[in-house]
Image (cartoon, coloured by chain):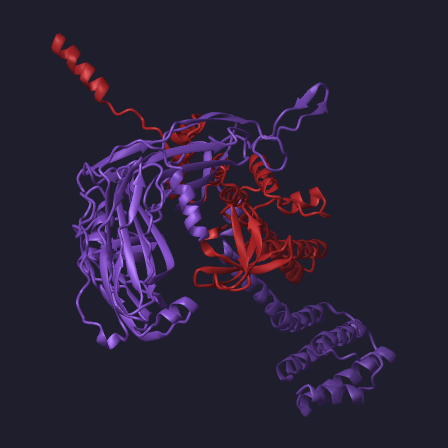
Chain colours: A purple, B red
């Protein structure tokens, strides 16, 4: 009741502005029914506008009216209304639904009376279809958009089926990446519950949800409600693309549902059934390659726009500037490629992020961001950035360009992070440091490798040095020893020739033994000296000869009998021969 | 006469003028602020003179002006290794490192000691060590064979040992796989892959030591921060 009152309030809000031809009709869904069945009276009012009042039902003694529903549709400013009254019979026998009256702009319209036969049980009711008082032309309004008209026409073709699913697309031969819409409607004229929906599978298509809505449509006099799910589609590549069937599983109310159940909310569910939409095959057209600009990133459609902003437009050197380029237009821009920012002299550019989406108004957008870091101060211009799209209506490419942006780059402010250190401080003697920068290029020829570097490449000399050192060490350790021995004999030989006294001869022999055999004769008795000589490899005969020589020299030293100078020549000759023997025999 | 004049003019204008060298062209472009074009010229020059410290220095200047502090640092470092006594190279390297938050002279190290340590290039230091070694060998030979120059031999041996120690210390630095972060921000991950979590971010121009390599990832040690982790190879410029 509150709904009806609310609807009346809305309806009375319309202004009166049209003098259309008003038509009024009424019909029932059946003319024969059982006592426990229900009857639906439908009153159609069309060609009205502005303030509309409810139709006046006649006196209905044979029925109890327990439900009233109103549905409104408006085309080209004209409003059509459908009033439905669900009634329960009270008596068995013939009953008449009198004329329904409708007042509009001071005139009263009325319908013809309708005769109804009420039986005691359902078994007695003859199975004759209910005559329609006003047959309708079942065709969609030609002013509707193609997608909605296609869905409505498919629905008209399925009149009489209480549940069905239809699907249609807004474009059956789209270009690659051209956005179009898929609509899937689940129509029902009866109550149901538990109806899970399974969306269609697609091939060679990119698909994303585009929202859902509800509505109603009168088909052959029966009011169908529908739930519609929409998808945004775009083809991935040229060729064939398919949209599989969508399905809905539902459980409808049973045929044996009684008016008692209806009144008191009872609901008996029927078996689970499935309805499917028709599969759709699309022919995807390739984009023309001729005259395709370099700035084309895959966008297809019409009505695009591009903007570029820089923030901030005045910045110290080495500080970041955010460059944002936004493209807006119909459909989904997500599938398009990222824009290529041109390289800018004097700037380091870091592409930062790309975001895309759809605004609440259904417009797609894609935002490209980049961070620009100017290296030195000055006034720079970011040139226009081109972005092209393909217009499927004119089958040509169009190029959009951003407005060139001007940036003012001041010297850097922070020390340690800039090329030009803007810290100013006085050094002294009136000299003030204004900025620090890198030293300039070097134009003079590079220094040749100096002599030290060249020496470092002569590693082979190290080996020679090491070899020489080893040889020297070897010589010092071994060769010098034998040389010293040989030198000891030669020295002794020379000195023996010059010796004039037995003392000198004894000293020569003593020195020889010390150098040659490392034998110290100073404190040793003769017996131990000869024993030492034997140990060095001297034969017993030579040792005996040395013993005789040594005794003779000692005798001459301690008991000289005659002139020493006259008798020493044979002694020195004897000493020389003994030393020769020792030299030959000793190890 | 006219023919002769024309012939002379043709000969004059057809005589090939001496072409500008890549270094000269690079300088010309650099002065015009066309740093990327100048960089191309210097990279061409580098192919002809791969061990020229001034080419590396000029490349570093181009990168610095283009805002690539990491690549600038890497090239200044290469130039410094070849010509360590050049004051401009030292200045620019120090400046590039400072802009990245790095210290050219480690804290606590006297400036004079640092300068002395890096006074000679590695090649020069090697040559000096060799020379001292040869002199020491000569002195030792004389000492062995002639029994004289003992003091000189001892002194030469001490100098060789000192020089060899210096060379050894520099060799360790030379063999260290130094690299510079060349991208604005590099993520340091706990393993060689994006499936490992990032533990730190390192900004451009920081010096790191590469200790290991696996596929497209380098294990790095950031001594100044006490960090160790994995960075993508593309984010690093090896020195």
Taking the image as shown, residue A555 lies to the left or right of residue A346, namely right
Q: Decide: is A95 above or below A394.
A: below
- Residue B77: image x %, image y %? 54, 45
Q: Say whether residue A228 is visible.
A: no
Q: How many marks?
A: 0
Taking the image as shown, residue A32 lies to the left or right of residue B107, namely left
- Residue A483: image x %, image y %? 63, 70
In the rendered image, the quadrant that contains the C terminus of chain A is: bottom right
- Residue A513: image x %, image y %? 73, 78
- Residue A465: image x %, image y %? 55, 59
Taking the image as shown, residue A147 lies to the left or right of residue B86, namely left
Give the residue displayed 68% in from the left and 79% down from the top: A579
Q: Residue furthest right?
A: A558
Q: Decide: is B72 above or below A579.
A: above
Q: Nearer the viewer, residue A504 or B6?
A: B6
Give the residue displayed 50% in from the left and 59% down from the top: B218
């Amino acid at each position: 009741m509150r709904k009806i009152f609310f609807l009346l309030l809305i309806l009375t809000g319309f202004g009166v502005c049209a003098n259309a031809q008003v038509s009024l009709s009424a019909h029932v869904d059946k003319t024969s029914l059982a006592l426990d069945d229900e009857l639906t009276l439908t009153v159609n009012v069309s060609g009205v506008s502005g303030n509309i009042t409810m139709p006046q039902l006649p006196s209905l003694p044979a029925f109890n009216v327990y439900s009233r529903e109103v549905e409104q549709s408006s085309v080209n400013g004209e409003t059509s209304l459908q009033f439905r009254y669900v009634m329960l019979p009270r008596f068995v026998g013939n009953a008449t639904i009198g004329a329904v009256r409708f007042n509009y702009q001071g005139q009263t319209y009325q319908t013809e009376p309708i005769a109804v036969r009420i039986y005691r049980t359902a078994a007695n009711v003859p199975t004759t279809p209910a005559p329609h008082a006003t047959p309708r032309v079942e065709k969609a309004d030609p002013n509707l958009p193609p997608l909605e008209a296609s869905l409505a026409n498919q629905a008209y073709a399925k009149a009489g089926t209480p549940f069905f699913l239809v699907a249609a697309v807004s474009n059956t031969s789209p270009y690659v990446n051209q956005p179009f819409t898929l609509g899937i409607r689940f129509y029902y004229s009866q109550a149901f519950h538990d109806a899970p929906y399974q969306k269609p599978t697609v091939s060679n298509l990119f698909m994303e949800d585009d929202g859902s809505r509800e509505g109603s449509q009168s088909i052959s006099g029966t009011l169908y409600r529908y739930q519609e799910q929409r998808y945004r589609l775009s083809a991935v590549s040229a060729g064939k693309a398919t949209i599989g069937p969508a399905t809905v599983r539902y459980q409808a109310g049973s045929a044996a549902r009684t008016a008692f159940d209806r009144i008191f909310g009872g609901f008996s569910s029927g078996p689970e059934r499935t309805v499917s939409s028709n599969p759709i095959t699309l022919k995807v057209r390739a984009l023309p390659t001729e005259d395709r600009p370099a700035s084309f990133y895959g966008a297809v459609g019409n009505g695009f726009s591009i903007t570029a902003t820089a923030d901030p437009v005045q910045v110290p050197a080495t500080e970041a500037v955010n460059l944002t380029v936004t493209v807006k237009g119909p459909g989904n821009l997500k599938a398009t490629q990222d824009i290529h920012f041109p390289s800018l002299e004097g700037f380091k550019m870091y592409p930062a992020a790309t975001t895309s989406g759809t605004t609440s108004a259904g417009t797609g957008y894609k935002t490209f961001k980049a961070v620009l870091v100017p290296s030195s101060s000055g006034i720079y211009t970011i040139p226009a950035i081109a972005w092209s799209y393909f217009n499927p209506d004119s089958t040509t490419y169009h190029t959009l360009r951003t407005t060139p942006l001007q940036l003012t780059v001041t010297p850097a402010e922070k020390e340690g992070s800039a090329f030009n250190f803007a810290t100013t401080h006085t050094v002294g003697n009136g000299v003030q440091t204004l900025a620090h920068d890198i030293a300039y290029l070097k134009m003079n020829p590079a220094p040749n490798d100096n002599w030290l570097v060249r020496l470092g490449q002569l590693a082979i000399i190290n080996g020679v040095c090491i070899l020489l050192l080893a040889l020297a060490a070897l010589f010092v350790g071994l060769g010098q020893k034998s040389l010293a021995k040989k030198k000891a004999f030669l020295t002794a030989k020379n000195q023996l020739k010059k010796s004039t006294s037995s003392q000198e001869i004894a000293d020569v022999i003593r020195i020889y033994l010390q150098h040659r055999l490392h034998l110290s004769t100073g404190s040793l008795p003769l017996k131990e000296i000869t024993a030492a000589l034997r140990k060095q490899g001297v034969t017993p005969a030579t040792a005996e000869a040395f013993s005789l020589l040594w005794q003779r020299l000692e005798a001459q030293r301690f008991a000289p009998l005659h002139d020493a100078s006259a008798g020493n020549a044979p002694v020195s000759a004897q000493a020389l021969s003994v030393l020769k023997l020792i030299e030959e025999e000793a190890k | 006469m006219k023919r002769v004049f024309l012939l002379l003019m043709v000969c004059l204008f057809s005589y090939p003028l001496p072409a500008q060298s890549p270094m000269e062209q690079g300088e010309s472009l650099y002065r015009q602020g066309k740093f990327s074009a100048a960089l191309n010229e210097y990279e061409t020059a580098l192919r002809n003179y791969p061990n020229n410290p001034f080419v590396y220095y000029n490349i570093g200047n181009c990168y610095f002006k283009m805002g690539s502090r990491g690549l600038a640092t890497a090239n200044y470092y290469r130039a410094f290794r070849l010509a360590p006594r050049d004051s401009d190279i030292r200045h620019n390297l120090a400046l590039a490192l400072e802009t990245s938050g790095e210290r050219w002279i480690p804290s606590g190290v006297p400036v004079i000691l640092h300068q002395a340590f890096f006074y000679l290039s590695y090649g020069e230091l090697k040559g000096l060590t060799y020379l001292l070694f040869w002199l020491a060998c000569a002195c030792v030979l004389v000492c062995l064979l002639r029994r004289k120059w003992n003091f000189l031999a001892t002194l030469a041996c001490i100098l060789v040992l000192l020089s060899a120690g210096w060379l050894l210390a520099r060799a360790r630095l030379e063999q260290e796989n130094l690299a510079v972060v060349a991208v604005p921000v590099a993520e340091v991950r706990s393993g060689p892959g994006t499936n490992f979590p990032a533990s730190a971010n390192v900004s451009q121009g920081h010096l790191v030591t590469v200790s290991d390599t696996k596929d497209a990832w380098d294990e790095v040690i950031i001594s100044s921060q006490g960090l160790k982790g994995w960075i993508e190879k593309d984010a690093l410029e090896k020195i």
